[in-house]
Amino acid sequence: MKNMQLKKRKVAENLRVIADLHIHGCYSRATSQNMHIEEIARFARIKGLNLVGTGDFTNPKWHKEICETLVQEPDTGLYKTVKNPESPVYFMVTTEVSTIFNSENTSKKIHHVILTPNIETAVQINERLAKYGDLRFDGRPTLDMNAAQLVEEVMEVSRENMVFPAHAWTPWFSIFGAFSGFDSVEDCYQDMAKHIYAIETGLSSDPPMNWRLSKLDKFALVSNSDSHSFWPWRIGREANVFELEKLSYREIFDAIRNKDKGRFKFTVETDPAYGKYHWTGHRNCHVSLSPREAIKLGNICPVCRKRLTKGVEQRVEELADRQAGFKPENAIDYMHLLPLSEIIAAALGVDSPSAQQVWDVYNKLVEKFGNEYAVLIDVPVEKLGEVAGKRIAEAIIKVRENKIRVIPGYDGVYGHPVLFEEESAAKSTVERVQQLNITDFI
């Protein structure tokens, strides 16, 4: 009995760490010009993130900002801001790179995330990667090297570095992408696949979709926002949740590498239908199709007769060797959530999560309960209702309990969450536009 009490006390003392390890700084294309370290830290705290990737350490200007604005915490391999070292937000030195190469006479375009334990090793990685492309051009540089070469160069700097494929299922620039990807990790990384321990699910897939491929069982499934903005409906919209005795690079690295369910508790995922490439379709033609419907049409758009953008769900269906619903024994758990701002906007019937009336409610909830993740995961419905009203409280709980419907995203168009039945009965304009009657074209 005494040992059991000690064990419970030890678990209770562990630190819950919510980590978003893949974001971009202001020197990446299509990124907010206000995406600086201090702003990232400020909004990460509001979101409830303990740990954020710096992103873009390969870019010289961003690397300079990292060096000037962050200071390393002793014995952690992590960093805090110089201006606010008391902040609970830590930074890990990270980047994303793009490799373009030919394999079996086919052009392959793959994005990869790199984690490294300190700025010094980042400098050494940059020195090696500069031989393969201009690191000044973008926050996410394009490198003339194959995936195996990338891993070899990074691992020769330090075995404490980690590389994993980014947003693994998106149609372009991903390891399993329909247009320029591979059918397996081993095909992509060749003899360097032994150094790949994780796969990033991306917005348009989630763990249950990846569990359908038995060859992915050995990899940890990580989830990150790939955010180009610090706004709370972007940063941290997907994340990884750990329980650690001590927050450090080594603890995070080991938890992912060993797929340690004791430390790596679950991932935060948006419903994959919310992602921009979940279903097959054509944005310009307003055509959105399930895998079954797209296959019936031979993946040809019924409006313009051009090839459809194949969605993630259809691509998973092509590679899966298990039925939907299978869960491996050693799987890390997951939780479907949506950004709080989007939940409030949907509950209020407002189009934009940045509307002032959304901010008014959002700020009240965060000020009362500490941060967005506390609101989304922990606070009881009664307490939420006291601050935000019954309808918004009910919407938050529906999302928490995964009791909402999402009209699938397709070809660069985000999915549309439906939170209330009256909204469903009315059938939204978005749904009417997206869901064509396929029988008209067969």
Image: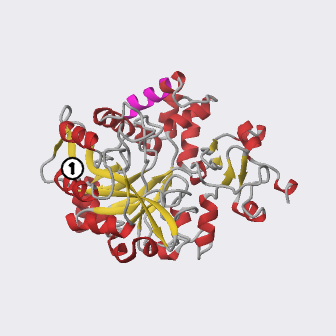
Q: Is residue 364 magenta?
A: yes
Residue 196 x %, y %:
36, 69
Residue 302 x %, y %:
79, 53
Q: Seen in the image, is 433 located left or right of residue 409?
A: right
On screen, residue 273 above or below 261: above
Residue at 41%, 74% (x, y): give it. 218
Main SS of residues in magenta: helix
Q: Amino acid at mark 1?
A: Leu
Q: Which residues are magenta?
A: 360-370
Residue at 62%, 44% (x, y): give it. 413
Crowding near pointer 1: few (<14 within 10 Å), some, many (20+)?
many
Residue at 64%, 41% (x, y): give it. 419
On screen, residue 193 above or below 172: below
Q: Seen in the image, is 384 located left or right of residue 290?
A: left
Residue at 32%, 71% (x, y): give it. 195
Q: Residue furthest left?
A: 74
The residue pinned by badge 1 equals 78
